[in-house]
Image (spheres, helix red, strand yellow):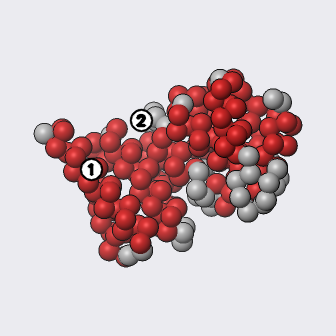
Amino acid sequence: MTTTELISALAEGKSAGKGRADEVAAYLLQQGQEALEQLWPGLYHTDAVLRARAAHVVEAVAKQQPLWLQPYRKEILHQLAQPNLDPAFNYCLPALLGQLSWEEEDLPLVIERLEFWLQHLHNQFVKAICLQSLTDLSMQQPWLQQEVLELIHQHMAKGGKAINARGRLLLKQLQKQERLVE
């Protein structure tokens, strides 16, 4: 499929849903890494619904093939993952940051972005995703675990069902990781 055909597929369906994003993700996974390049312009589309659906596809691909997104890491971090996060990316970019492997020089900015969104976005689900991504990063970077533990406890103390439920799971995950290291 060309970029135009992928965007057309993403445009189908009700604006409130994800349309055919799952089908597009399955198609890209079937076609291979090179096909992802055809979708990429969708992340910059003027229509917020199409940007959100393109981001959903990228996240779905990253869940199964995170290495496919490695060439796009710098662009994701420096152009898409801005402090004033595009609302179209609220649910996908925070998750994506936790799924990718980062170079040491980029890690402080990744952590800074996730912590900024955790503090400034009001959606509890997005905050839970940020905590999940920080936990995922701390599994790769043990020096980050203490800070992440404190953030989880801090946000659980503030309340919110999504935060508390995810926080309990993340604390168990970190405790299990700690036992493996000992």
Q: Is residue 64 toward the left or the right of residue 145 in the image?
A: right
Quadrant where the C terminus lies? top left
* Quadrant hosting residue 177: top left
Q: Position of residue 94 (x, y in %)?
A: 53, 52
Residue where numbered disc 2 is placed:
104
Amino acid type indicated by mark 1: Leu
Number of the front mark, 2 or 1: 1
Badge 2 density bin: few <14, some 14–19, many ≥20, Cα 10 Å: few
Q: Is residue 182 above or below residue 175?
A: above
Q: Position of residue 46 (x, y in %)?
A: 82, 53
Quadrant where the N terminus lies? top right
Visible in this render: residue 151?
Answer: no
The foreground one among 59 and 18 is 18
Query: Closer to the N terminus: mark 2 or mark 1?
Result: 2
The foreground one among 122 and 144 is 122
Kindly identify the residue that appears in the image at 18 percent across and 38 percent down.
181
State yes or no: discs 2 and 1 in contact (Cβ < 8 Å): no
Q: Is residue 176 toward the left or the right of residue 72 in the image?
A: left
Q: Is residue 3 toward the left or the right of residue 113 in the image?
A: right
Amino acid type indicated by mark 2: Glu
The foreground one among 60 and 118 is 60
* Quadrant hosting residue 73: top right
* Quadrant hosting residue 159: bottom left
Residue where numbered disc 1 is placed:
174
Q: Is residue 72 toward the left or the right of residue 38 in the image?
A: left
Badge 1 density bin: few <14, some 14–19, many ≥20, Cα 10 Å: many
Q: Position of residue 15 (x, y in %)?
A: 78, 60
C-alpha distance separating marks 2 and 1: 21 Å
